Image (tube, rainbow, N blue to C red):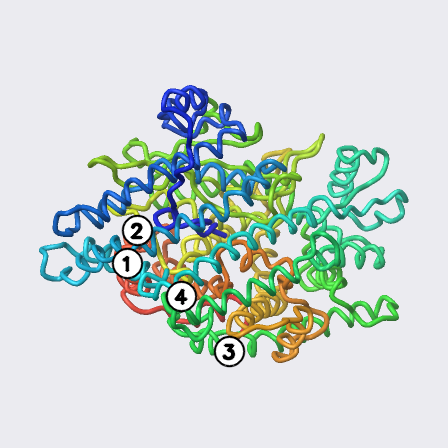
């Protein structure tokens, strides 16, 4: 996933004026604060080794103050509004605040602590007000509107006009046209939502990383687990003060293999319940009231802004345009996938019955019997694959794919400061050897890290004073960690995830454009195209032969295993599509509500899932109380975007395959130009059509998932 902007830096700043210190006192106080000086590190990366939690708040205060001064200068400029003195000046404002924000919010996700979490809650209302003071500044908006009204007769080029139009639309969508009374209501809603979102995420972090451990002290309860999983559990036990036992957690590398292989059904149920009841335990970390209030406030906010509901507000600026289009799209997929999932269930029940199981399969049985079904149908055990997918080999394999597609190279660096010792850094260069950007990788789970995987940046690609600003991109994951006797060995899902996040990284590295508002900025339902298209190369036989090598012997993956991977490509696609589409529909159902009063979250979720005929053996990929994408990640009313973009990525890869060359240089050049570099210069579909020479077809996606 690409972490959508936690804050829209150009729209969220306010003036902080309560400062009694003298200028000299302030300078002395901030002398050791790295945010107050230009970075002197190689490639001007953040000096993580010098950043202390105490540095953030004064830097935020100063950043907001400086930004507000810039905004005031633009808004009170007595000259006639022009692109340069209004739009461009606004576009380039807030540099100091952006710098500190990118470090703080990224690290608050990847390596937080109690002080950072407290600070996030403290900053939330300040920054919400700051953003509202800008977006509802009448003098600033009046100047932007004047430039907007004359945009087609001012000699502006196409990209200048697009920047003008996007900023004008932003201000309208943020309430610039509302009455003073309604703006006051909107401010209160925005402040509440910003705090609630942080509360939701912090509760989920506690529920995932601190409030559940499955502790096993009887070795018989490990029956069925691969040795590598047992070893990892023993090391987790040692790290958690349970030496001599085995501990499983709610991080994916721990609970998923337990569900896949452990023969103890009661324990499988216990860990799965621990996972799907997160945020729903009626404790201090319960998220039901928080998300209910968020749904209510989002509905009220959308109504204030003239939209039927929050879903309409969000989707109106996406490729889909209307909720009806998304509903029809998801309905078609669910009708195609649910019969396939039911067929998969019947096959698994048959296996269970054949083994003498005297029970009807439940949701916590799916992974276990799916693994048995995979073995029966394709003679493939996922544990056979892991030795060929060491993290280093997978990483180097995707680098090789990028090199063959785009000519870029990756050089590991050891002289850059990092925020955790295991973080890796690489310099990325163009084919001609020129510097393109810096890439950070943070691979493994820890208690201070949010779950999942995402891509963000510490510095976006752009232009300043006529010079290109090179991107500093970060990829954060929660992969299977190394053990004392083996490196990190990825399962197939983790392999695809690394390729996926790397696709987001390429989007960030390749982005071009003169204006922050449009450079690389795409509709939410386009965001996952760059990432998902990269997944396609991971499993191609030609590519597997490049990177899938045994971590001990260095031998290439056997052709027999490649064949099994290819033959099993459509395996379990009914389940995977249904659980995903179910979550997408749940998201939209919440956000199609026009008004909300005393929302019973559990009852609403059940009614939503019952309405689509979701079978009891499958729960939505994310249940409400841990649905971080929509309540703490910027994907509210937009979780559908992954499968919407999957239509694009399947169609794009089909274009490569039908050309007869997976690395077709002409197609790769067009994809980089139109879909990655210049993607913000026009509407999403327009950019895709420039690349593909036609609109995408749904057929490649349906064929890939075996849903035709």
Mark linked to residue 332: 3
Q: Does residue 67 appear in the picture of this structure?
A: yes
For image coordinates 34% across by 66% down, the residue present is: 179
User: What x and y, as percent, mark residue 28?
Assistant: 42, 19
User: What x and y, as percent, mark residue 309?
Assistant: 46, 72
Q: Which residue is mark 2?
A: 517
* Mark 3 → mark 1, Cα distance in angstroms: 33 Å
Q: Does residue 665 appear in the picture of this structure?
A: no
User: What x and y, as percent, mark residue 397?
Assistant: 49, 41
Of labels 3 and 4, earlier in sequence is 4
Q: Is residue 383 left or right of residue 100?
A: right
Asked whether the beta carbons under mark 2 and mark 1 sit within 8 Å of each other, the answer is yes
For image coordinates 57% across by 27% down, the residue present is: 421
* Mark 3 → mark 4, Cα distance in angstroms: 39 Å
* Mark 2 → mark 1, Cα distance in angstroms: 7 Å
Q: Nearer the viewer, residue 378 or 505?
A: 505
Q: Which residue is mark 1?
A: 166
Q: Nearer the viewer, residue 605 or 266?
A: 605
Of labels 3 and 1, earlier in sequence is 1
Asked whether the beta carbons under mark 3 and mark 1 sit within 8 Å of each other, the answer is no
For image coordinates 42% across by 32% down, the residue present is: 19
């Amino acid at each position: 996933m690409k972490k959508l902007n936690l804050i829209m830096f150009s729209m969220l700043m306010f003036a902080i004026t309560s400062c009694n210190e003298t200028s000299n006192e302030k300078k002395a106080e901030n002398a050791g604060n790295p945010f107050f000086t230009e970075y002197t590190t190689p490639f001007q990366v953040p000096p993580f080794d010098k950043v202390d939690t105490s540095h953030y708040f004064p830097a935020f205060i100063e950043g907001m103050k400086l930004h507000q001064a810039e905004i005031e200068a633009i808004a009170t400029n007595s000259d006639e509004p022009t692109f340069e003195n209004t739009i461009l000046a606004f576009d380039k404002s807030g540099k100091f605040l952006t710098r500190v924000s990118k470090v703080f919010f990224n690290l608050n996700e990847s390596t937080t602590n109690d002080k950072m979490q407290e600070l996030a809650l403290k900053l939330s209302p300040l920054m919400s007000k700051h953003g509202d003071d800008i977006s509802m500044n009448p003098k600033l908006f009046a100047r932007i509107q004047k430039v907007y009204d004359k945009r087609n007769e001012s000699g502006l080029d196409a990209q200048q006009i697009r920047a003008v139009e996007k900023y004008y639309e932003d201000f309208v969508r943020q309430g610039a046209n509302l009455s003073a009374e309604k703006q006051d209501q909107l401010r209160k809603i925005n402040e509440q939502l910003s705090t609630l979102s942080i509360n939701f995420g912090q509760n989920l972090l506690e529920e995932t990383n601190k409030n559940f451990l499955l502790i096993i002290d009887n070795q018989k309860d490990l029956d069925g687990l691969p040795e590598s999983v047992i070893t990892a559990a023993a090391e987790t036990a040692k790290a958690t003060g349970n030496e001599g036992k085995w501990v499983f957690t709610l991080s994916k590398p721990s609970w998923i293999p337990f569900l896949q292989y452990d023969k103890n059904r009661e324990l499988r149920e216990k860990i799965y319940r621990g996972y799907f009841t997160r945020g729903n335990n009626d404790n201090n970390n319960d998220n039901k009231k928080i998300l209910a209030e968020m749904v209510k406030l989002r509905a009220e906010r959308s109504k204030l802004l003239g939209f039927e509901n929050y879903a309409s507000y969000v989707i109106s600026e996406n490729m889909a345009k209307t909720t009806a289009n998304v509903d029809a799209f998801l309905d078609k997929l669910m009708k195609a996938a649910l019969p396939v999932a039911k067929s998969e269930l019947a096959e698994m029940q048959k296996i269970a019955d054949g083994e003498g199981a005297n029970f009807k399969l439940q949701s916590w049985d799916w992974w276990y019997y799916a693994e048995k079904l995979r073995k029966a149908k394709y003679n493939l055990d996922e544990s056979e694959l892991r030795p060929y997918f060491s993290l280093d080999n997978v990483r180097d394999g995707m680098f090789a794919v990028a090199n063959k597609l785009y000519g870029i190279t990756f050089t590991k660096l050891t002289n850059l400061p990092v925020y955790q010792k295991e973080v890796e850094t690489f310099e990325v260069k163009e084919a001609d050897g020129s510097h393109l950007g810096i890439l950070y990788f943070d691979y493994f789970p820890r208690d201070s890290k949010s779950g999942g995987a995402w891509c963000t940046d510490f510095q976006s690609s752009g232009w300043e004073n006529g010079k290109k600003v090179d991107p500093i991109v970060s990829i954060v994951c929660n992969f299977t960690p190394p053990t004392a006797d083996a490196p990190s060995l990825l399962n197939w899902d983790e392999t695809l995830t690394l390729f996926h996040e790397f696709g987001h990284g390429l989007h960030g590295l390749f982005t071009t454009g003169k204006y922050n508002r449009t450079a690389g900025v795409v509709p939410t339902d386009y965001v996952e195209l760059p990432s998902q298209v990269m997944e396609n190369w991971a499993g191609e036989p030609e590519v597997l032969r490049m990177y899938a090598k045994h971590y001990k012997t260095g031998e290439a993956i056997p052709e027999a295993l490649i064949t099994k991977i290819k033959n099993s490509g459509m395996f379990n696609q009914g389940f995977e599509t249904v659980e995903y589409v179910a979550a997408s529909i749940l998201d939209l159902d919440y956000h199609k509500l026009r008004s909300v009063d005393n929302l019973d979250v559990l009852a609403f979720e059940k009614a939503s899932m019952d309405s689509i005929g979701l079978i009891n053996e499958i729960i939505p990929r994310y249940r409400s109380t841990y649905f971080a994408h929509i309540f703490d990640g910027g994907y509210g009313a937009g979780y559908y975007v992954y499968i919407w973009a999957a239509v694009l990525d399947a169609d794009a890869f089909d274009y490569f395959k039908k050309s007869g060359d997976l690395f077709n240089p002409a197609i790769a050049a067009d994809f980089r130009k139109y879909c990655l570099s210049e993607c913000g210069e026009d509407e999403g579909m327009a950019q895709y059509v420039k690349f593909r020479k036609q609109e995408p077809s749904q057929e490649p996606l349906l064929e890939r998932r075996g849903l035709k």
